Amino acid sequence: DEIDTLTNLNKIEYLPGLFIESVKLEGEHYIIKCMEISTKQKVYIRASVIYCCLGAISTSKIVLSMSNKKNGLPLLSTPGGSFFIFSYRKFHKENHKILSSKSFAGKLDDRNYEGNIFPFSKNLVCTYFGELLGGFLNFLFGKLIFSKLFIANIYFDSDMSNSKITYESDALKINSKTTTILRQYFKKVTKVIRKEFFSRGLLVIPFSCKLLLPGQDIHYGGSIPMKKNPETNQCNFNGELKGFKNFYISDASSMPFLASKGQSFNAMVNSYYIASKSVSPLE
């Protein structure tokens, strides 16, 4: 809707269907090399100011190719885990729509965690067992078992993530690993959650707790963070990339920290903040 409104006001020219391959600084201008997706034709755009909002992975690729740094970038994520819950009291009798969830949050050892509880719906049963078998199992055990079964996701702050993104020889690589600190903290948190949930009529099913593998966490960012004294591949507090005048990182890549929650709203605020520093309001 926002793009349509701007287009109708003749304030911008919207160019759909272009894949951005690279950005190069030539003199005081940037040359954006694109490919028209349907025709494979090369398109070059000359720009004096760029607001890069491609998402953390694509933005990191563009910046790494511009700076020619081979040591890579730290890639922040919100590491998480999951577990199954069985409701033995009234929780399962409450109204839980398929796409709705119940949230929970807490703090332990000065670290935050947040999560959501989703009903084990017919859709989930079919995801695990296939459409045909899942539908049959749901018909047999839906009211008896699955209506009392829930799945929970839990996420942690980005300072517990350990990922790195590199770009060499036109190949983008992400190296990640689960740290010992994260494993230990996950065990401590699930122990606290078990007690709290049990008091509320929810039984965390034994052996169902597992950490998500790197890459299964749902949020990325912080690869080109804003810093007071930025270095190469970092931004100042206006979101401007170090060494590249008028090149702004306006997505989650420039966020120096990701909280243990969904980042959509935070990323939108970050984009608005960076744009408001340098763009005059439309008349």
Image: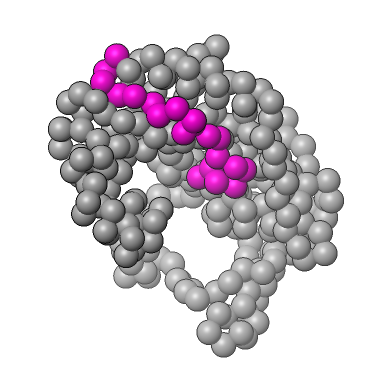
Magenta highlight: main SS: loop
**Residue at x 39%, y 34% (from the top left corner):** 84
Q: Is residue 68 left or right of residue 88?
A: right
Does residue 63 lie above or below 178 as drawn? below
Front one among 64 and 282: 64
**Residue at x 70%, y 50% (from the top left corner):** 174
Front one among 208 and 237: 208
Residue extending furthest toward the top: 109
Task: For the C terminus, give its image quadrant.
Answer: bottom left
Front one among 218 and 38: 218
Magenta region, residue range: 199-218
**Residue at x 15%, y 37% (from the top left corner):** 95
- Residue 153 in which image quadrant: top left
- Residue 195 in which image quadrant: top left
Task: For the N terminus, give its image quadrant.
Answer: bottom left
Q: Is residue 249 left or right of residue 197?
A: right
Q: Does 200 appear in magenta?
A: yes
Image mark count:
0
- Residue 93 in which image quadrant: top left
Does residue 267 lie above or below 168 as drawn? above
Q: Is residue 83 left or right of residue 8?
A: right
Percent x, y for residue 110?
54, 13
Percent x, y for residue 171?
76, 63
Asked whether residue 151 appears in the rendered view, the answer is yes
**Residue at x 55%, y 12% (from the top left corner):** 109
